[in-house]
C-alpha cells in the first residue's frame, strides 16, 4: 500500500509517518491517542509541494488521530483526507496496517464477452435477520456463496467509501479512501474480495469522483482557504463547482487533486485487489451541466483526468474493468485515448434499459413497440458489442418511486402470473442480447418494492421462488456457454430478423464472427396470447433444439408449459435466412434454440 499512497498515515520500522497536503498553513500538528491528543506534541515539517510530514515513533496500528492546522487566525482540526480507516464520518482517523488485510487470492476476471455482473448494496445485501443497523461486509461475504450458486462471475459493489451516518446508497462520500465504518474495517473488505475470488467472481467497486459529500465533509475549506465562499483547495472555487449535489466538484485541473483521485482508484485495484471500477455520473466529470455538445460547460480537465487515471490503471492492472455510468450515449467514453476517448472498457446503456422496461411495463399488448425492442437489442456505442452494460434493474431504475420490474408490471402483486412472466422475459432479453448483462440484488427471486437503504433483501424468497432462481441459473449458464451449445451468446454478432408488431413477436440470432454456423436463435413473445404453429426463419435448415423455455413448469407451477422441444427447420427459407421452422411459444415467453449437434 505504501507504493500506492503518497500521503496519509503509513506504518514503518520507526513508527508511523504522517503526511498531508496543506498549502495555506502556518503550522501543522498531528494529535491522537498516541500523545493523549496533545495539540503541540508532534509538529509536522513543511516539505516539498506544501506536503507537511513527520514521524511519530509511539504511533501504532489502531491509534486514532487528527490533524491540527493553524492558518492565520484559524485553528482547525481535520480528519486525514487519505484515512483508510475511521471511527465515523465525523470521528477520527485510525492508523491502518500496510495493505489493510490478508494476502489476495490469485485471480483473473472473465473477458468482457463472458462477464455477468451482479450489483449489490452492502447495507441491504449483507444484513442478517434480526440484525440492528445496516448490513456489513462480513454478512455480505457470507452471501457470496449464493451468487456462486446463481452463476454470476462479477459483483459490482455500490460505493464503500465513508459517508454520513450508517444508511446511504453511498453516493455522498465524505472520505473516499476510508471503508464505511458501519460496514466494517478495511480488512473486512479485503476478506470480501478474497472470498469472491475464491468463488470465481471479480469485484468491481463503485466510485464517486463527480462530487464529494456534500455532508460531513472535512475536505471543505480544508486549510481555511477558499474563494467566493466555495470549497477551498480540493474543489473548484468558481462556476465550475456547481453539481446537482452541491458546489462540491473536485478541481480536476489541480495536480494534487488529480493525484488524490488517481491514488484512490489504484488503492481499490491494487491495495485491495479489486478487479474494476464503476465510475458514477461521468457526464458531470466532463461537463458542468452533464451535457453533450455543450462546449461552454465542458471540463477539459475532467476528460483528461479520466484518460490519465485509465493510463495509470492499465499500467499496473492491464485487465482492469473500468465502467462509466454516463447515460448520454457518448461513444467516446469507451474509445481509447489515442482515438480521443476516455478509456473506459464499457458503459451503462440506458438505451437498453429504458425501452425494454417500458415495453414490459405497458399494460396493453397492442401498445408494445417491437421496433423499440429491436433497437435496444442492436444498439452499440461503437464497434464492440460488449462495451455496454445492459440490464432491466439497477439501483437507479428501481428507486425513488420507481419500482422493480415485477412490481411495475403488476403493482401490489409482484408474484402474479403476469409479473413473473414479464420479469422472466426481461431477464432473458438481458442474457441473450449483445452486451455485458447485469442483475440487481434480489432480482433472481422476485424481490419487490423499490430499493432503499433501510430495506434489506428478503432472503426467504430464495426458497419461496426457487423455480425463478433456477430460471436465472439456467439463463446465466446459457449466456456463459456452460453446456457448449450457446457460444453464439458470447459472440459479437446479432441479427434481429423477425419483428412482428401485430403479434408482438421478435426473433434474433447471435453468433461469433468466426463461427456463423453456430448461431443461437432467440424467439420472444411479448403478448399474453400463446403463439402455436408460429413460423420464423432459422439460420440453417435442420433440427434445432430448445435449450430454454421460460414458460416451463420447472420454473413455476403457474406457467403454461407451452413450448416446442425441438424444431425441424426446412430449407425453404424465411426472414432472409436459409431455413424456416414452426415454433410454439407461451404467453410472455422466450425460447432459446441451437442447431442439434452444435
Image (spheres, rainbow, N blue to C red):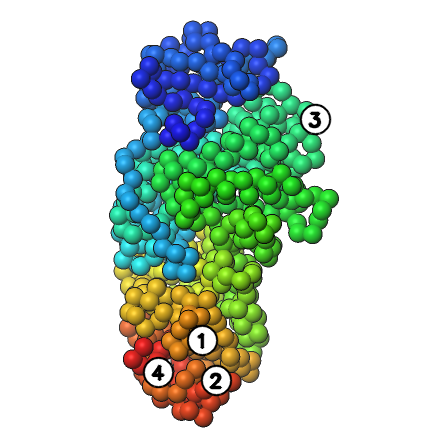
- Seen in the picture, residue 277 relative to 382 is either above or below; the reply is above
| Label whose residue precedes the other's in the sequence (3 or 2) | 3
Q: Residue 85, how many percent across, how many down?
A: 39, 28
**Label 1, label 4: how far apart the Cα atoms are:** 13 Å
Residue found at x 56% / y 61%: 382
Q: Position of residue 92 (x, y in %)?
A: 42, 22
* Location of mark 2 (residue): 577
Marks 3 and 2 in Cβ contact (< 8 Å): no
Determine crowd level at label 2: few under 14, some 14-19, many 20+ residues with C-alpha closer than 10 A.
some
Q: Residue at x 28, y 69 (%)?
A: 483
- Whole-percent x, y for residue 255 in the image: 57, 30
Please report contact status of discs 1 and 4: CB closer than 8 Å, yes or no.
no
Quadrant the C terminus occupies: bottom left
Closer to viewer: mark 4 or mark 3: 4
Q: Which residue is mark 3?
A: 228
Asked whether disc 2 touches disc 4, contact meaning CB atoms under 8 Å apart, the reply is: no
The disc label shown at residue 188, or none: none
Q: Nearer the viewer, mark 3 or mark 1?
A: 1
Examine the rendered structure and indicate whether residue 85 appears above or below residue 131.
above
Dot 3 or dot 1: first in sequence order is 3
Counting other residues with Cα less than 10 Å from the Cα at mark 4, is it few (<14), some (14-19), or many (20 or more)?
A: many
Disc sitting over residue 509 in the figure: 1
Residue 300 occupies quadrant: top right
Q: Residue furthest right?
A: 296
- Mark 3 neighbour density, 10 Å: few (under 14) some (14–19) many (20 or more): few
Amino acid at each position: 500500500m505504501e507504493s500506492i499512497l503518497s500521503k496519509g498515515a503509513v506504518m514503518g520500522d520507526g513508527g508511523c509517518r504522517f503526511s498531508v497536503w496543506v498549502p495555506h498553513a502556518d503550522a501543522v500538528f498531528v494529535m491522537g491517542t498516541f500523545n493523549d491528543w496533545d495539540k503541540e506534541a508532534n509538529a509536522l515539517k513543511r516539505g516539498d509541494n506544501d506536503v507537511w510530514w513527520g514521524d511519530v515513533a509511539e504511533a501504532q496500528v489502531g491509534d486514532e488521530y487528527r490533524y491540527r492546522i493553524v492558518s492565520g487566525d484559524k485553528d482547525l482540526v481535520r480528519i486525514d483526507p487519505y484515512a483508510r480507516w475511521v471511527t465515523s464520518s465525523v470521528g477520527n482517523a485510525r492508523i491502518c496496517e500496510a495493505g489493510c488485510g490478508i494476502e489476495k487470492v490469485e485471480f483473473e476476471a472473465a473477458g468482457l464477452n463472458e462477464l455477468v455482473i451482479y450489483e449489490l448494496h452492502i447495507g441491504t445485501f449483507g444484513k442478517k435477520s434480526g440484525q440492528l443497523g445496516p448490513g456489513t461486509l462480513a454478512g455480505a461475504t457470507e452471501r457470496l456463496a449464493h451468487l456462486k450458486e446463481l452463476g454470476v462471475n462479477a459483483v459490482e459493489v455500490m460505493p464503500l467509501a465513508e459517508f454520513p451516518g450508517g444508511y446511504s446508497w453511498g453516493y455522498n462520500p465524505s472520505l473516499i479512501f476510508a471503508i464505511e465504518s458501519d460496514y466494517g474495517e478495511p480488512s473486512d473488505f479485503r476478506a470480501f474480495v478474497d472470498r469472491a475470488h475464491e468463488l470465481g467472481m471479480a469485484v468491481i467497486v463503485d466510485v464517486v469522483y463527480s462530487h464529494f459529500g456534500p455532508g460531513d465533509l472535512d475536505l471543505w475549506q480544508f486549510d481555511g482557504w477558499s474563494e467566493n465562499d466555495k470549497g477551498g483547495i480540493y474543489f473548484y472555487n468558481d462556476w465550475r463547482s456547481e453539481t446537482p449535489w452541491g458546489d462540491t466538484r473536485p478541481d480536476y485541473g489541480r495536480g494534487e487533486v488529480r493525484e488524490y483521485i488517481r491514488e484512490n482508484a489504484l488503492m481499490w485495484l491494487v491495495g485491495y485487489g479489486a478487479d474494476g471500477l464503476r465510475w458514477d455520473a461521468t457526464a458531470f466529470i466532463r461537463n458542468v451541466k452533464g451535457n453533450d455538445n455543450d462546449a461552454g460547460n465542458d471540463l477539459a480537465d475532467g476528460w483528461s483526468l479520466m484518460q490519465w487515471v485509465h493510463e495509470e490503471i492499465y499500467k499496473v492492472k492491464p485487465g482492469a474493468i473500468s465502467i462509466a455510468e454516463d447515460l448520454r450515449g457518448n461513444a467516446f467514453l469507451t474509445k481509447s485515448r489515442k482515438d480521443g476517448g476516455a478509456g473506459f472498457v464499457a458503459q451503462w446503456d440506458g438505451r437498453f434499459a429504458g425501452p425494454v422496461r417500458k415495453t414490459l411495463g405497458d399494460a396493453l399488448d397492442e401498445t408494445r413497440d417491437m421496433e423499440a425492442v429491436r433497437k435496444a437489442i442492436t444498439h452499440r456505442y461503437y464497434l464492440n458489442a460488449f462495451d455496454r452494460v445492459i440490464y432491466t434493474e439497477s439501483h437507479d431504475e428501481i428507486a425513488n418511486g420507481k419500482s422493480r420490474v415485477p412490481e411495475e408490471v403488476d403493482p401490489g402483486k409482484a408474484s402474479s402470473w403476469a409479473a413473473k412472466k414479464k420479469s422472466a422475459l426481461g431477464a432473458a432479453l438481458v442474457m441473450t442480447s449483445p452486451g455485458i448483462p447485469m442483475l440487481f440484488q434480489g432480482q433472481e427471486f422476485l424481490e419487490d418494492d423499490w430499493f432503499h437503504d433501510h430495506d434489506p433483501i428478503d432472503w426467504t424468497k430464495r426458497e419461496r421462488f426457487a423455480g425463478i432462481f433456477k430460471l436465472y441459473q439456467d439463463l446465466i449458464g446459457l449466456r456463459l456457454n456452460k453446456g457448449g451449445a450457446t457460444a453464439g451468446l458470447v459472440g459479437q454478432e446479432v441479427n434481429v430478423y423477425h419483428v412482428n408488431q401485430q403479434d408482438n413477436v421478435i426473433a434474433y440470432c447471435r453468433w461469433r464472427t468466426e463461427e456463423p454456423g453456430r448461431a443461437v436463435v432467440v424467439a420472444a413473445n411479448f403478448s399474453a396470447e400463446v403463439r402455436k404453429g408460429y413460423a420464423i426463419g432459422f439460420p440453417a435448415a435442420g433440427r434445432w433444439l430448445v435449450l430454454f423455455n421460460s414458460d416451463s413448469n420447472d420454473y413455476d407451477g403457474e406457467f403454461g408449459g407451452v413450448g416446442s422441444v425441438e424444431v425441424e427447420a426446412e430449407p425453404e427459407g424465411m426472414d432472409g435466412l436459409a431455413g424456416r421452422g414452426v415454433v410454439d411459444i407461451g404467453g410472455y415467453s422466450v425460447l432459446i434454440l441451437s442447431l442439434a449437434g452444435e
